[in-house]
Amino acid sequence: DDPSQIGNLPQLEVASDVADNYGQRLQGYLHVPESGEYSFFLAGDEAAELWLSNSTQPEDAIRIINLTSPTNLRQWDRLSSQRSSTVTLVGGSSYYFQALHKEATGSDHFT
């Protein structure tokens, strides 16, 4: 309810090696360029989740990825849990999303 930053991201990626023992939440709207089947991927150190709504409403969001083990930066194939099931999205529509990241110690990243 009181974000430390507000802005637009051309891709869902945040700065690496920021600190230890913190969490972050990114939320916004995915604007779909064309209708089709989409899969989503997460890479992160320590843990991460991706929630996606079937509308612009946050209360309709469901968790589509639950990453409980760390990966390397932009490593998309370490764990099967990094990839969502296929989701059908409609071109020209917007969908609410929320991405959560929890860092403990060591290297940190979130993509």
Image (cartoon, rainbow, N blue to C red):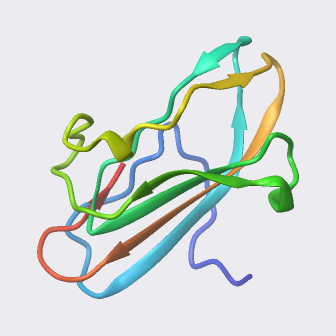
Please provide percent x and percent y for residue 65: 49, 50
Q: How many marks?
A: 0
Identify the residue at horizontal 51%, vertical 27% (top origin): 39
Q: Nearer the viewer, residue 9 or 100?
A: 100
Q: Which of 45 and 84 is in front in this view?
A: 84
Residue 20: quarter of image: bottom left
Compared across the picture, whether 96 is left or right of 65 comes to right
Q: Which of 23 and 68 is in front in this view?
A: 68
Residue 69: quarter of image: bottom left
Identify the residue at horizontal 25%, vertical 81% (top origin): 19
Identify the residue at horizontal 81%, vertical 59% (top origin): 58
Compared across the picture, whether 92 is left or right of 41 comes to right
Compared across the picture, whether 25 is left or right of 35 comes to left
Name the residue furthest left. Answer: 106
- Quick check: 95 above or below 2? above
Compared across the picture, whether 3 is left or right of 49 comes to right
Residue 94: quarter of image: top right
Please provide percent x and percent y for residue 27: 65, 59
Identify the residue at horizontal 43%, vertical 79% (top origin): 23
- Quick check: 10 above or below 26? above
- Quick check: 56 above or below 31? below
Please provide percent x and percent y for residue 1: 74, 82
